[in-house]
Image (spheres, helix red, strand yellow):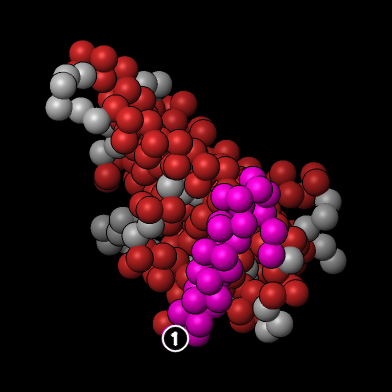
Amino acid sequence: MSAVEKFYVWLEAEQSKIEPKKRGRKPSKKQYFTLVAQEAIIAYNLETDQMLRNKIYKEHIDYPFNKLVENIYHTFKFSYFDVPYEDVKCEVVAFLNEKIHKYVDGKGKAFSYFSIIAKNYLIIQNNANYAKMKRRAEPVLIDESRDLTSEMTLSSHQESLRDFVKQWCKWYDANLNYIFTTRRDIVVADTLLELFRTVENIEEFNKKALYILIRERTGLKTQNITRVINVMRADFARMFITYSENGRVQY
């Protein structure tokens, strides 16, 4: 029996447990991202048959993903997108689809995991659009008080940092099993790498959000997470020095 077929057997059993609603009872607020959606995502990731994957996605994942993005977008009122809302929602849902295989069964709730991914993606895109808007307005604002040499130097540094982070993530991902030997540490490191990939600038990290994301996915205590962070931070600093000298990431 395939993973999707097992899911539908489980779903039928769960639905049989639901008691019929009493007449006259007011309906409660409908939840859109339930345990069913989480189990559907798990089954989707385990399934190898593409037709079955398409079926379970259309019936049990597509709506929760769309509703999740919709709620986050309107809750945080992102205002620097120059395309229609529906286009933004489709883009974020597509990004969640790219990351769906990263969700680990038993390592936190799927709702929390994908909420953080969607929110971070929207923040990054919103901030990038705001930066573009500022750049378009800058020629009008230039005056003698601005230090253009310093601004160009900072811009160059940030561009180098972005390039280094891309190379570093790719190298670290390929060598993860050599650097860390336990499954626990590997999951923490993989989550950190995912966060690196979804932020535009390392200096914009929100420490609290980082720890919440990792705890949700791994179920580990802060001290276990901190140990892996310290290893990666030391490697990051050392490898950035090498990158600055020759333009390549080397351990």
Picture layout, residue 120 above or below residue 82: below
Q: Amino acid at mark 1?
A: Gln
Q: Is residue 230 magenta?
A: yes
Where's residue 9, x and y in %?
A: 71, 67
Horizontal arrangement in the rendering, residue 50 relative to residue 250 (left or right): right
Picture layout, residue 173 above or below residue 225: above
Quarter assignment of residue 131: top left
Residue at point 35%, 65% (across, down): 207
Q: Could one spot residue 17 in this view of the protein?
A: no
Quarter assignment of residue 156: top left
Where's residue 5, x and y in %?
A: 77, 61
Give the residues in magenta: 223-251
Where's residue 233, x and y in %?
A: 50, 69
Quarter assignment of residue 179: bottom right
Horizontal arrangement in the rendering, residue 190 relative to residue 206 (left or right): right
Q: Decide which of 7, 179 is in the foreground and name it.
A: 179
Horizontal arrangement in the rendering, residue 107 relative to residue 29 (left or right): right
Residue at point 26%, 39% (across, down): 77
Where's residue 180, x and y in %?
A: 67, 78
Q: Give the overall secondary structure of the magenta segment.
A: helix
Label 1 neighbour load within 10 Å: few <14, some 14-19, many 20+: few
Picture layout, residue 167 above or below residue 236: above
| Disc 1: which residue | 223
SS category of the residue bearing label 1 = helix
Residue at point 26%, 20% (across, down): 138
